[in-house]
């Protein structure tokens, strides 16, 4: 196959390109029933302690407090987690090659005591639960999940393999679900079965069509998840089209992580060339463009391509919280949100920041043995993790994680108009800012951390030495430092050192996105940089005594490669 690297590992070859537009199997008369199925109308008997409206007010309050505490570089945080990734059990009806890979563990559930601690110590401030982790949320522990959701006004991020997603089960979850993710890695049954071992394919393909239809009728956002692997790479675009024919408007293509130390054999990024992976991406983008779909490409650097004209309305709580999280990515580049408002609880009660922290990597404590707020959420491990996120001195597992990737330089940001209309600079901006000519920021490097004021470089077509330079925290208008400088210009490059006094005004360990403006040689127009990069005024914070987080320079090494190096091969 063109652009596919030779395979050196003992893997089954890539499936051959054929005619992938196959129809699902014919319906079977009998469908499997999930173990631990709650009785009918179980949700009606659950008391409500906190309504959805009350929880929305709590979310707003917590975001104001948390934003202030992050600005102050607090290590101990007042708000409890917004989201909990909860492994209510480790039971799964499948054994997918990128997960258990045929070696499912002995079934365990959260004990009633742990469920109660989860409910009472996190529930009042918890907004979202992801009720899965190597498990199927609609089996075995659905009753416990449903109780916490209704009692505490918690929404669910439901990721299901759809085998138990009957119409009755859909009506149980629809009221409490923020987003429904269907994990269906291929629309071709024989490819699907190579990936999702032990699946009852007839049940899955029978359920997905009605579930998608019901989601649309009830205004519930429904997305299909596809993990990119060697088996399905050739058919990703065709799968997107097939799911769209069923009514799906959003497809999420996900980079595979080798969490079981065997999945490497099926990793498309390990066995296919970057050119081929990018070809798959471009094919899928084209299908989504033609069909007016949304593609979330979480392979390498996260990108979203939204071609929808009238998509399913997203839950407004989710819109608000996603927007806030996006803002924090710019305000605190490289600071993983898992460290400040998310948490993962494993079936044995162990608490970690994320699903990648397996085998006790980044363990924060244990829900069953310790007070969650004081000893786990604000214990020494959690505080040291936040210290590392502020400073870039992160544990070994986080070093190579693409979740921490800093957003690329932006063509426009909120502070630009603020500077251009500031009365203080009215004389400089008396001429219009043109867009057909621009400068290119070439230094310092994007998102670099520096203690001293940087040497700044700009490629420019003009020779005027007077420039306006503005640095804005998070690219917003709340804290903007603007100065006039005189640059040295030689061979089309303007160079100047950012003024030390102005540099000292920057908040340390915060992302400042910067722009520069220059008058044209004839004085009739203004140009500015085409893309605004980020710079961080760095301040070191020593590691906390007693922390057991593992760092590279202490001889610790990540047990799982979280893909940042592979992302760099693909480019942005």
Image: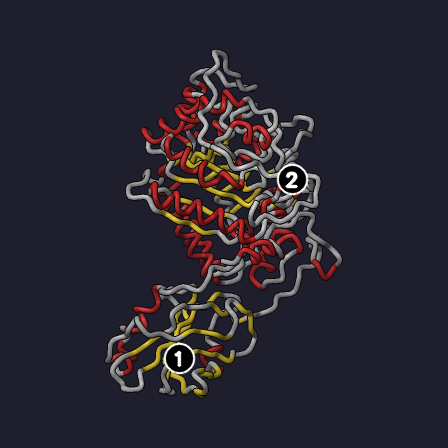
Q: How many marks?
A: 2
For residue 529, which numbered disc appears in the image?
Answer: none
Left or right relative to 134: residue 410: left
Near mark 2 (Cα within 10 A), the count class, few <14, some 14-19 or many ≥20, is: some
Residue 513, position as x, y percentages in the image: 43, 68
From the image, state whether disc 2 or disc 1 is nearer to you: 1
Residue at image x 68%, y 51%?
Answer: 558
Residue at image x 38%, y 30%?
Answer: 246
* Residue sitting at the far right: 555
Mark 2 lies on a secondary structure that is: strand
**Snapshot colouring:** secondary structure
Residue 454, position as x, y percentages in the image: 51, 78
Q: Is residue 353 above or below residue 24?
A: below
Pick the front one: 339 or 563: 563
Pick the front one: 533 or 117: 533
Q: Are marks 2 and 1 in contact (CB under 8 Å)?
A: no
Left or right relative to 480: residue 260: right
Q: Is residue 532 visible?
A: yes
Residue 6, position as x, y percentages in the image: 65, 47
The residue labelled by disc 2 is 350
For residue 460, which numbered disc appears in the image?
Answer: 1
Q: Quadrant of the N terminus?
A: top right
Left or right relative to 140: residue 292: left
Q: Is residue 190 above or below residue 337?
A: above
Near mark 1 (Cα within 10 A), the count class, few <14, some 14-19 or many ≥20, is: many
Residue 439, position as x, y percentages in the image: 39, 75
Q: Is residue 47 visible?
A: no
Q: Earlier in the sequence, mark 2 or mark 1?
A: 2
Residue at image x 42%, y 71%?
Answer: 514
Pick the front one: 58 or 477: 477
């Amino acid at each position: 196959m063109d652009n596919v690297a030779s395979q050196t590992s003992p893997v089954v070859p890539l499936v051959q390109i054929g005619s992938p537009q196959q129809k699902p199997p014919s319906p079977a008369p009998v469908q499997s029933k999930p173990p631990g199925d709650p009785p009918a109308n179980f949700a009606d008997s659950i008391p409500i302690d906190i309504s959805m409206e009350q929880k929305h007010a709590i979310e707003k309050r917590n975001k104001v407090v948390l934003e202030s505490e992050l600005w102050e570089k607090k290590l101990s945080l007042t708000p409890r987690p917004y989201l909990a990734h909860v492994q209510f059990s480790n039971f799964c009806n499948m054994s997918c090659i990128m997960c258990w890979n045929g070696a499912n563990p002995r079934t365990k559930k959260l004990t009633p005591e742990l469920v109660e601690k989860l409910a009472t110590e996190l529930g009042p401030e918890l907004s979202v639960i992801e009720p899965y982790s190597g498990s199927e949320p609609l089996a075995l522990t659905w009753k416990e999940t449903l109780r916490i959701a209704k009692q505490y006004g918690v929404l669910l991020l439901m990721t299901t393999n759809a085998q138990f997603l009957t119409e009755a089960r859909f009506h149980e979850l629809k009221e409490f679900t923020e987003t429904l993710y269907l994990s269906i890695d291929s629309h071709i049954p024989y490819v699907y079965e190579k990936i999702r071992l032990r699946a009852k394919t007839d049940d899955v393909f029978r359920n997905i069509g009605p579930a998608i239809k019901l989601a649309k009728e009830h205004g519930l956002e429904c997305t299909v998840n596809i993990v990119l692997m060697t088996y399905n790479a050739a058919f990703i675009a065709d799968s997107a089209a097939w799911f769209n024919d069923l009514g799906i408007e959003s497809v999420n293509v996900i980079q595979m992580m080798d969490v079981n130390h065997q999945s490497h054999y099926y990793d498309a990024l390990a066995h296919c060339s970057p050119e081929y992976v990018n070809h798959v991406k471009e094919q899928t983008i084209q299908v989504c463009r033609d069909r007016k779909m949304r593609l979330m490409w979480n392979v390498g650097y996260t990108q979203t391509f939204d071609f929808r004209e009238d998509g399913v309305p997203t839950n407004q709580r989710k819109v608000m919280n996603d927007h806030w999280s996006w803002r924090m990515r710019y305000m605190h580049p490289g600071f993983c949100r898992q460290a400040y408002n998310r948490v993962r609880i494993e079936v044995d009660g162990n608490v970690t920041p994320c699903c990648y922290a397996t085998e006790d990597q980044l363990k924060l404590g244990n829900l069953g043995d310790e007070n969650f707020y004081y000893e786990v959420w604000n214990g020494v491990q959690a505080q040291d993790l936040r210290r590392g996120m502020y400073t870039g001195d992160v544990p070994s597992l986080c070093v190579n994680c693409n979740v921490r990737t800093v957003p690329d330089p932006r063509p426009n940001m909120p502070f630009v108009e603020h500077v251009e209309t500031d009365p203080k600079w009215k004389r400089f901006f008396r001429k219009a800012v043109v867009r057909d000519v621009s400068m290119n920021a070439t230094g310092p490097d994007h998102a670099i951390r520096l203690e001293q004021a940087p040497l700044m470089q700009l490629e420019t077509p003009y020779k005027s030495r007077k420039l306006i330079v503005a640095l804005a925290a998070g690219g917003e208008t709340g804290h903007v430092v603007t100065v006039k400088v005189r640059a040295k210009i030689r061979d089309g490059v303007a160079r100047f050192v950012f003024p030390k006094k102005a540099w000292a005004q920057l908040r340390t360990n915060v992302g400042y996105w910067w722009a520069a403006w220059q008058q044209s040689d004839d004085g009739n127009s203004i140009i500015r940089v085409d893309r605004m990069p980020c710079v961080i005024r760095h301040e070191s914070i020593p590691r906390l005594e007693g922390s057991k987080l593992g760092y590279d320079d202490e001889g610790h090494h990540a047990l799982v490669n979280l893909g940042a190096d592979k992302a760099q091969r693909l480019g942005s």
